[in-house]
Image (cartoon, rainbow, N blue to C red):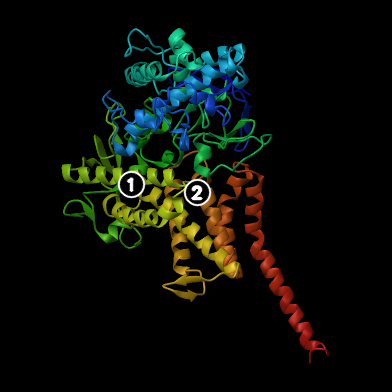
Amino acid sequence: MTDVRKATTHAGLGLYATKQFNPGDVILEELPLFTFQPTAEQFSVVRSQFAPKSFKGGSDNDDTCTLGENQSCLYDLIFELGDNDGDSNGECYGGIEKKRSKFLGMVTAAATFAIATHVDGANTSHKSSCTEINRKKLNQLYKPEFNISSASSCTSSSASTEKVGTKNDVKKHDDGEKRIVSLATTKVIPFIKENTLPGTALHKFVHENEEDCIGVMLIWSCNAFEGGHVYETMSRINHSCDFNAVISPSSSSSETALPSSASSLSGKAPIHNNEKQIVKATSVIQPNDEINISYLGSYTYAGMSLRKALLSADKFFDCHCTRCIKETSSSGGDVASALPCVNCHDRVQGRYLDEDVQYDDDDENEVCYALPIKDLTSTSGSSDGDCSNYVCQKCGPDHSFVLGQSLNATVEKTIKRVTSHLNECERQIGGSDYNDKRDEMIEMTERLIGLSHSVLGAKHYCTNLLLVQSLGQKLSAIHSSILTISTGQKRKKKGTVVEPEVDMTEIAECIDLLDRAFKFVQGLNLKSHPGHLLGNATVGVSRMLVSLGDVKSMKFGASWAEKVREYFSYGFEGNGMVKVVDSLLNAWKRKAGDEKEEGTNDQDRKKSKIFP
């Protein structure tokens, strides 16, 4: 049903369909060749590879240090890494932060592999499943070629699974390879040599097989899924900003969690007890079509400049997928980065939009948008305003323009502030202090929505990703209120006990936010269903409306559930969600039936002699 072959649209290998797949069809189901992230039982063995001084808070005489929260025991040493090797993508793209994370991941991957393949001493009991056959299969996966005698040299491997756009992009891809090879050879390898204890598996691995150690780190960097899992076939699936497949939990796995809509499309499926994962089609895939997933999560719906910068910082390649190519053509344009046309709409101080323009909610006053058409060969990793020629959909190409210096600086600053906030929100979710910071994050989200509207307008990806973030925050608060009401709890406000109530204004705002987000995603004209980003939020709005209890609200809730019924029917989020959506679709019918029956009973009682 699939075949790994030389790509027809770019220079490397890819996974291709040999039959037609429809949305929801299982393309591939696979167990990992190897897992580069240690299990809880193996953490102590990984810890034993390093001198105590290597650990956060450790010293030469300290043997009680543990890996600590988020396995960040080495983070204090990694923190000194600078951004001095040409990999500068700006704070909002996490250039330095991603490099530190990549550094820590390389160290962990090398240690885990060394322990798993070490066959003597006490470490034998911790040996993982890594047979000689699996080792050979691992070595067949993509990794940049390198020369350990020259840290900065690397060449493209024509027999590898390259995650790159076109054959004309060799130099850019080589630049990405040089950065990742340089990190492994000039930063990570010296760190391991200096900080591992003699006689340990990792110490022997790096000193006796340095080339293999570098290769292992590069294989992890270029092929691992969430949790450090590397697969023989699945790891060969290339990225596309217009994906046609997602990673989903295997039906035969013991599920520990359901994936979120955004995480499933980014390849970040939940970890299962046996780590088996499946690839599902999200749109019709014809025979000989390449199968692609997105590596970007919710940023799949961002503008081209941000997508390219994130992929460069985290995956070390420059994307030339069909969507990126289309967005650079004169007949295309980057729809996600649309700005109100500067020729059609004046700005206050040359930077800020009038209120009737920024919200674009007045049918009598049409807002004209201009799309950036950016040079795909540009090496800039900055925001959408840089190096972009804007073409207004009303004025036409004869009146194209480039943003002025002041406006361009304001646009770039706004994009950085928004993406930094979105990244921080993602980091905070699930954290131990999330509840303490929730109100602060909600307030910041609302402030940035106002800023984004005033600078970027209603159709820009920053505005709409903030709307999705705000929607999730508001739904969480509303469902908490509904739960409080249903359990009969009361709350205190300024020392006074008050009855809990649902804020109908907040409900109306949630509906408006979801409606605008749907229009934005649909306007991108991607192959896959909007439910991949908005599925769970739509179910949340539907639940909220159904919980109000009256037939009219419940019917309205069912209309929202209908928008994502098809998405959930494909099983992207598990069978449980299919049942939830079906229940929301039919809730109003049950309510109407109950009311009709109750009305009939009331009439019967009036006729009855027992109830005169």
Front position in the image: 298 or 90: 90
Name the amino acid, label 1.
Answer: Val
**Residue beneath label 2, please?**
534
Front position in the image: 43 or 23: 43
Q: Is residue 179 left or right of residue 480?
A: left
**Residue 306 falls in image quadrant:** top left
Q: Is residue 467 left or right of residue 290?
A: left
Within 10 Å of the Cα at label 2, are there few (<14), some (14-19), or many (20+) other Cα atoms?
A: many
Camera-near label (1 vs 2) is 1
Residue 315 position in % (x across, y down): 41, 27
Mark 2 or mark 1, which is nearer the start of the sequence?
1
Front position in the image: 373 or 103: 103
Look at the numbered disc 2 and give the secondary structure of its residue: helix
**Residue 93 falls in image quadrant:** top left
**Residue 450 vertical placement versus 53 (above, below):** below
Distance between the alpha carbons at the discs numbered 1 and 2: 19 Å
Disc on res. 498: none
**Residue 467 vertical placement versus 282 (above, below):** below
**Residue 215 vertical placement versus 369 (above, below):** above
Residue 251 position in % (x across, y down): 67, 36
Query: What residue is rendered at 49% in x and 26% in y?
Result: 47
Query: What residue is rendered at 60% in x and 46% in y?
Result: 568
Name the amino acid, label 2.
Answer: Leu
**Residue 81 falls in image quadrant:** top left
Within 10 Å of the Cα at label 1, are there few (<14), some (14-19), or many (20+) other Cα atoms?
A: many
The answer to whether residue 289 is visible is no
**Residue beneath label 1, please?**
418
The answer to whether residue 225 is visible is yes
- The mark total stands at 2
